[in-house]
Image (spheres, rainbow, N blue to C red):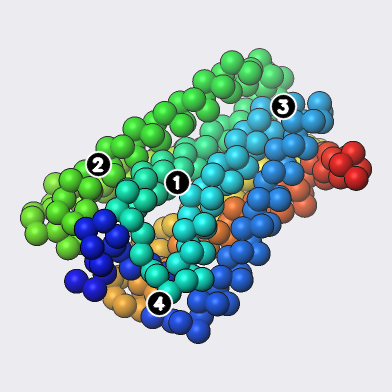
Amino acid sequence: MDNYSSSFDFILLGFSDHPRLEMMLSGVVTIFYCITLMGNTAIILASLLDSRLHTPMYFFLRNLSFLDLCFTTTIVPQMLVNLWGPKKTITFVGCVIQLYVYMWLGSIECLLLAVMSYDRFTAICKPLHYLIIMNPRLCLKMIVMVWSISLANSVVLCTLTLNLPRSMVKIACVDTTAVEMSVFGLGIIIVLTPLIFILISYGYIAKTVLKMKSKAGQCKAMNTCGSHLTVVSIFYGTIIYMYLQPGNSASKDQGKFLTLFYTIITPSLNPLIYTLRNKDMKDALKKLMRESG
């Protein structure tokens, strides 16, 4: 097959069927990668250095920013190598490592967004008990659980796939029904279950906000949730739209750009989404810039 150059150097990557587009894409990817690095690093530093931001919400936000840094760094360097150079391949070992890490980090984001929705639910629906419920020990346990469950999911799912001939479900020369059902089941658990949890959390939040008599209180509550809801909408909207596409060539090209969107552009948007609507974070970033200047 054309996609295999040797047993150790294989899988045709990039947008080689659109050569004129590759140079433009390399510039776009580089720009957004730099924005991702600077924006998420700034959020981590600002929230660590400002004592006002030592709360559960910003603890989870730091984790999201760190995750975005890891997620894009797993993909972008190899992508730029393929976009810039004539060689559109990746080594077998590199492919396996990237697959496991990519699946691990993608699963983490699904679960982390669900944990962040629970944090917002507790803050708005149980404000008097918020700091008691969301204590540092529980927050740390939740993060460890998220990373651990996601790692287990990645190991199981990727190992099932790699045990097939040529490591690809669609071209494997065996009956792949069991593997496809396993992948589907894990997808339901890791993707849809957190989404359902998020929707339920925001159902209770909406109910509580509507009962508030103070308009100022309603606005504050919605501002608190607005950034998270925006990130959830972009992340899940892109994934659901992409995986509901039929398997024709047009949708495959579209899938490439959608994958590019949620792996490159979305992580660069998250810092903007969380800072533009958040006065405390904007103040912390200004303080950080003053001190670094």
Q: CA distance from mark 1 to mark 3?
A: 25 Å
Residue closest to the far left: 174
- Residue 155 lies in what quarter of the image? top left
Residue designated by label 1: 106
In-image side of 122 versus 153 (left or right): right
Cβ atoms under marks 1 and 3 closer than 8 Å: no
Amino acid type, callout 4: Ser
Measured as percent of width and height from the top left, residue 184 is found at 26, 48
Instruction: Please give the residue where the numbered disc 3 appears in the rendered image.
Output: 55
Residue 107 in view: no
Tell me how far mark 4 sits from mark 2, CA to CA: 29 Å
Task: Check the picture and name the quadrant holding the C terminus.
Answer: top right
Question: Which element type, helix, strand or loop, lies under badge 1?
Answer: helix
Q: Are marks 4 and 2 in contact (CB under 8 Å)?
A: no
Query: Closer to the camera, 152 or 237?
Result: 152
> Which element type, helix, strand or loop, lies under badge 4?
loop
Instruction: Count residues near mark 4 (Cα–Cα under 10 Å), then give few for <14, some for 14-19, many for 20+.
Output: some
Instruction: Assess whether mark 1 and mark 2 are in contact (beta carbons under 8 angstroms).
Output: no
Alpha carbons under labels 1 and 4: distance apart: 26 Å
Label 1, residues with CA under 10 Å away: few <14, some 14-19, many ≥20:
many
Question: Of helix, strand and loop, which one carries label 3?
Answer: loop
Q: Is residue 292 left or right of residue 255?
A: right
Amino acid beneath label 2: Thr
Task: Name the residue that disc number 2 marks.
Answer: 159
- The amino acid sitting under disc 1 is Gly
Q: Nearer the viewer, mark 1 or mark 4?
A: 4
Query: How many neighbours does mark 2 have within 10 angstroms: few (below 14), some (14-19), or many (20 or more)?
Result: some
